[in-house]
Amino acid sequence: MFDYLKYLTAAVMTVIVIWRFPAVRYADAHRRALWGGYAGFAVALWLYTPAAMHAANRIPVVDLSALLRHFASTAAIMAALTYVATSYGRSSESAVPRHVAVSRWIARASYAAGAVGIALLTVLFFTVVDRTTPSQNFLIDHAGQWGVAVYMTVFYFFPLVTTAVCGYQWTRAARQAESTSMRIGLRLMGISMWMGLTHTLARITILWVAVAFPLSRSTVQLLIDATVIWMNLLFLIVAVGASIPTTRAAVARWKTWRTLYTMHPLWFDLVKAFPGTSLYPPGRRLAELRHIRVPIDVRLDRWTQDIADACEKLRYYAPQDLMFAAEDTTASHSDPEPAAEAYWIRAALLSAESTPASACATAPLREKPFVDSYSEALWLARVSTAYSCVTRDQARELLLNVGRLESEPHR
């Protein structure tokens, strides 16, 4: 049961690391530090799993997996402290609150302290820790040994400071958060840090009590297993708390991706008909949506502008009464206005294949009360949905109807 919980916690933390990996690409120390903390804890959690411990035990250094776990955890802790410090903006700002100044000082000191701590852990590991026989569980098998108690106390100094600082800062920030999702996320993160502080103090207490008052192996195992469950629970709470504030961004990204997916048929035909409208040659739908050369929101803005520019060029090929005929054709359509524009575009494209450009452009498309570029993109997605259902024969028939309209008195 414990093993399954270990694998679950490590897997969840790894998913968050992969989810937040784009932060590494940006020159933002704040987001990079957060990703570094998650990555370090993910490595440490995987090293706690039986499979990783078995693989590490093949290296001819007794209990090396324990040392590697502590190295990874220390690196993650320093990244977490950096994240907390950078949460308050530039360190060059003057007259900052005392708690901000203290957090920044601790973050700056953590690098030197971390280097000294890792060196000290290495020395203690190879000198005072009794490693005559490999251990299945580092703490349980070495319980009652003063060398391990000293070694682990040095290691636990870092999470002790980190959980206290992060718990205070995130609890305080949760009270001031503007959005509900951010408030809930920070509150869960703060709770997890106070749980981490309790876990660290409990581990130190267990180790030194076992040295002062020898405990039975079953008692030590019961206490250590309880702290293991507590630790995995707090990491799952961290995962949930870190994910909640990003759900809105994930939902917004999904909506943007879905809008691009819907707009592609319209954008592809227009850009293909007028080469040079887009900054790059159009590709097929899945190929376009797989590209990461441009952020997805920027790409949506570009596609919207590309469609608008191409429609302006189509005005020189569209017959004068094409929009009137399109509106008559789509009067009974379930979404008539976008459908009329879709018919106009399809028919104008067909006309552009065989008719030279006119010297004068027809009237522009109907005015729409767009409040921003995204609302325009949503409109174009509706147009594209209707456009995909318009066939060449229907567009040809619409052009014939326009010819009949133009032979009648002007409307």
Image (cartoon, rainbow, N blue to C red):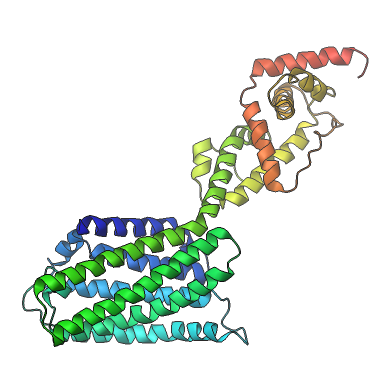
Residue at horizontal 44%, vertical 74%?
Answer: 167
Relative height, residue 112 to residue 364 (above, below): below
**Residue occupying the far left of the picture:** 133
259 on left or right of 400: left
Please say whether residue 81 is visible from this viewpoint.
yes
Q: Nearer the viewer, residue 152 or 173?
A: 173
Question: Where residue 357 sits in the image (x, y, percent)?
Answer: 79, 29
Quadrant of the image occupied by residue 349: top right
Please say whether residue 277 is visible from this viewpoint.
no
Q: Could you tell me which quadrant the C terminus lies in?
A: top right
Q: Nearer the viewer, residue 397 or 37?
A: 37
Q: Nearer the viewer, residue 62 or 59?
A: 62
Q: Could you tell me which quadrant the N terminus lies in?
A: bottom left
Residue at horizontal 43%, vertical 55%?
Answer: 19
Question: Where residue 391 sits in the image (x, y, percent)?
Answer: 63, 19
Counting the numbered discs, the total is 0
